[in-house]
Amino acid sequence: MKKKNRINELKVTLPSYSVNESAARAVVSAFTAQLNPTFDELSDIKCAVSEAVTNSIVHGYRDMIGPVVIGVKLYDDRSVRIEVKDKGRGIEDVEVAMQPLFTTDPDGERSGMGFTLIENFMDSLSVRSSPGRGTRVVMKKKLSALPVSR
């Protein structure tokens, strides 16, 4: 089995202002575009990044501003690894938080589907968190093969 090699990487830190969610999505999609993903693949990645960053902003930092760190690694096997980290409130019970419709803001406009959406759009999702210390979300996606030129 051939070992995959990292061909490029990006790390960006944004303050947890809600307006920065769209900037994070744009930066990650523009960076990932060098692998020539399909429109659907790029849409999936953008949605997953939006959900992860929004979770950091809305739940991690709730009523304060802090850093949201986004790391993207691209590999020669056409796979993408995206990490979104914050130093916010953390998640008390990750297993419970990952259940569809679970929300810490039942009176708000949140549906509790963030992690479920990420799982549906990406090939894998890993969430690690410690209350009071923050959360780390790692998402991976293998892109389809490039079309053969004639």
Image: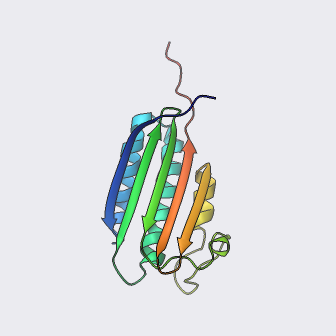
Where residue 14 appears, as percent x and y from the top left, is 32, 64
Foreground of the two, 44 or 59: 59
Which part of the image, by quadrant, shows the N terminus? Answer: top right
Foreground of the two, 43 or 88: 88
Where residue 116 appears, as percent x and y from the top left, is 63, 63
| Left or right of 43, for residue 71 | left
Residue at horizontal 40%, vertical 58%? 70
| Left or right of 26, for residue 117 | right
| Left or right of 83, for residue 1 | right
Foreground of the two, 21 or 65: 65
Looking at the image, the residue that sits furthest to the bottom is 107
Where residue 16 appears, as percent x and y from the top left, is 35, 71
Residue at horizontal 57%, vertical 34%? 144
Where residue 148 appears, as percent x and y from the top left, is 53, 19
Name the quadrant containing residue 100: bottom right
Residue at horizontal 48%, vertical 34%? 5
Residue at horizontal 49%, vertical 63%? 52
In this rendering, the answer to whether 95 lies above or below 73 is below
Looking at the image, the residue that sits furthest to the top is 150
| Total numbered circles | 0
| Left or right of 93, for residue 54 | left
Image coloring type: rainbow
In this rendering, the answer to whether 148 lies above or below 5 is above
Foreground of the two, 124 or 49: 124
Name the quadrant containing residue 105: bottom right
